[in-house]
Amino acid sequence: MSTHRKAIISVSNLRKQYGDFSAVKGISFEVYEGEIFGLLGPNGAGKTTTLEIIETLREKSAGEIVIDGLNVDHDQNAIKKIIGVQLQAAGYYPNLTLLELLDLFSGLYNVSIDNKHMLSLVGLEDKAREKYKSLSGGQKQRFSICTTLINKPKIVFLDEPTTGLDPQARQNLWQLIRGIRKGGTTVMLTTHYMDEAEQLCERVAVMDSGHIIAMNTPDHLIDELVASGFERKKEVKKANLEDVFLHLTGREWKDE
């Protein structure tokens, strides 16, 4: 299966230190070309820090990262040309229309794009002349993913893409993310929603307190937990990825 696939991201012994605090404690993993890979963990686990280091937005303290043959230490400009990074909502001018924002971003990337086509990829062609601030939460998230696709990236990074969305908007976004992968783009995302990881990800790495404590397909992790004798109370299915996560980390969290 995955063992014969090409690694498009290789992370080796990655560490991030803030003074006396270790946010990331020597983690290693690979993301294969053309997969949706999930980095899971509670708030403070180190997943966003890890993502930002891979995206070249944050300096690492130690370790090595290679992205499509390019080393983060020497090739940051080349790496930026082949990745798409999702901005948080604060990154947009609220009074500009979607067409104006796409003009702005394509200028920053120095690429020529068909704005209407870009919006159609994320189901927002009918909102082209509306201001960003008038969009719903789900539409804003879809537009933020649209901006990650402007430079036709090989890899798209999504940090907690569905936080705060209603169930239908989450489903729509999942469909969009699957479509991006179907188009040949590798997707790496962070989430603390276990159902999201179970639905979307081919493989997941579970992070807790700066360590990776498990990594495999969601099915394998669930089967492993069931085989250990674990059984959910009053459920048809014996376990799901949320059970694996809680079992590994020993903690619960709120959906915020």
Image: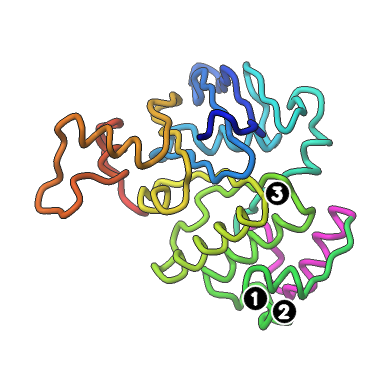
How far from the left and from the top, in percent, is residue 4?
Answer: 58, 30
- Tag 3: residue type? Gly
Few, some or many C-alpha atoms within 10 Å of disc 2 (few <14, some 14-19, many ≥20)?
some
Name the secondary structure under disc 3.
strand
Residue nearer the viewer, 82 or 109: 82
How far from the left and from the top, in percent, is residue 248?
Answer: 29, 30
| Picture quarter with the C terminus | bottom left
The magenta region covers 90-110
Tags 1 and 2 in contact by the CB under 8 Å rule? yes
Magenta stretch, overall SS: helix
Name the secondary structure under disc 1.
loop
- Tag 1: residue type? Leu
Placement of 169 over or under 41, stated as above or below: below
The label number, if any, that marks residue 124 in the structure image: 1
Residue at image position (50%, 68%) is 172
Name the secondary structure under disc 2.
loop
The label number, if any, that marks residue 96 in the structure image: none
Residue at image position (71%, 34%) is 56
Placement of 204 over or under 181, stated as above or below: above
Q: Which of marks 3 and 2 is nearer the N terminus?
A: 3
Residue nearer the viewer, 45 or 27: 27
Q: Name the residue under label 2.
A: 128
- For this view, does 178 lie left or right of residue 119? left
Asked where in the image residue 123 lies, by quadrant, the reply is bottom right
Asked where in the image residue 112 lies, by quadrant, the reply is bottom right
Q: Mark 3 points at which residue?
A: 84
Verify whether residue 97 appears in magenta: yes
Residue at image position (56%, 17%) is 13
